[in-house]
Image (tube, rainbow, N blue to C red):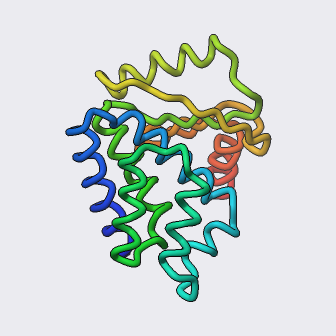
Amino acid sequence: MVSTRAAARYAKAMLEVSLEKGNVDAINGDMILISQSIAQSSELKVFLTNPIVKDQLKLNALLEVFAGVNEGTKELFNVLKANSRFGILEATALAFQKQYDLYKGIEKVTVTTAMPIDASIEAKVLEKVKTLAPGKEAVITNIVDESILGGFILKIGDIQYNASLANQLQVLKRELIK
């Protein structure tokens, strides 16, 4: 909980500084790269959270692994070193992405279907999102889950609409049991 709040504060500061410097899009790209890299590499995650490894070694490793990132991102690494907070780097990167999306008016939409969606279905989903979240730019992620059997599950922010066949069968089963 505390690290989540600290990560949000670091992310907010990063967003403010990057807006002042006019490199917010580049920093967001760096944060996506960092969060994906840490999520995909358990070794990197363990390395960053290991209290035995010296902060200078962690900084040197990050500067080498992420040599192509923006100077503002490298400055974040230095701030994390100064405060011995490398363990929240991934959470900070994810928090930055959320704050960036809010700033840009981007709404993340997840559509879970039994089969991959095609362009026509994606267009229909985008139209529906425009009515549910006016003025927002929607970014759709399609998750294929054969266990839902058919239909879809639409998640927009905190709202979830479950129109899956599996859910309808579950509702029918509950009604029959009554």
Q: In the image, 131: left or right of 143?
A: left
Task: Please state which of residues 18 and 110 is positioned toward the viewer in this rendering.
Answer: 18
Residue 32 vertical position relative to residue 65 in the rendered view, above or below: above
Task: Please state which of residues 36 and 106 is positioned toward the viewer in this rendering.
Answer: 36
Query: Which residue is rendered at x = 62% and y = 50% of the image?
Result: 175
Q: In the image, 9: left or right of 161?
A: left
Q: Position of residue 147 (x, y in %)?
A: 77, 45
Query: Which residue is rendered at x = 48% and y = 39% of the image?
Result: 29
Q: Position of residue 55 (x, y in %)?
A: 48, 77
Q: Position of residue 136 (x, y in %)?
A: 34, 26
Q: Residue 149 sits in which quadrant?
A: top right
> Residue placed farthest to the bottom in the image?
52
Total numbered badges shown on the rendered structure: 0
Residue 138 vertical position relative to residue 166 in the rendered view, above or below: above
Q: Residue 19 sits in which quadrant?
A: top left
Query: Which residue is rendered at x = 33% and y = 37% of the image?
Result: 24
Task: Please state which of residues 120 and 11 is positioned toward the viewer in this rendering.
Answer: 11
Residue 156 vertical position relative to residue 7 in the rendered view, above or below: above
Q: In the image, 85: left or right of 90?
A: left
Q: Position of residue 8 (x, y in %)?
A: 32, 60
Screen quadrant of the C terminus = bottom right
Query: Which residue is rendered at x = 29% and y = 22% of the image?
Result: 135
Screen quadrant of the N terminus = bottom left
> Residue placed farthest to the top in the image?
120
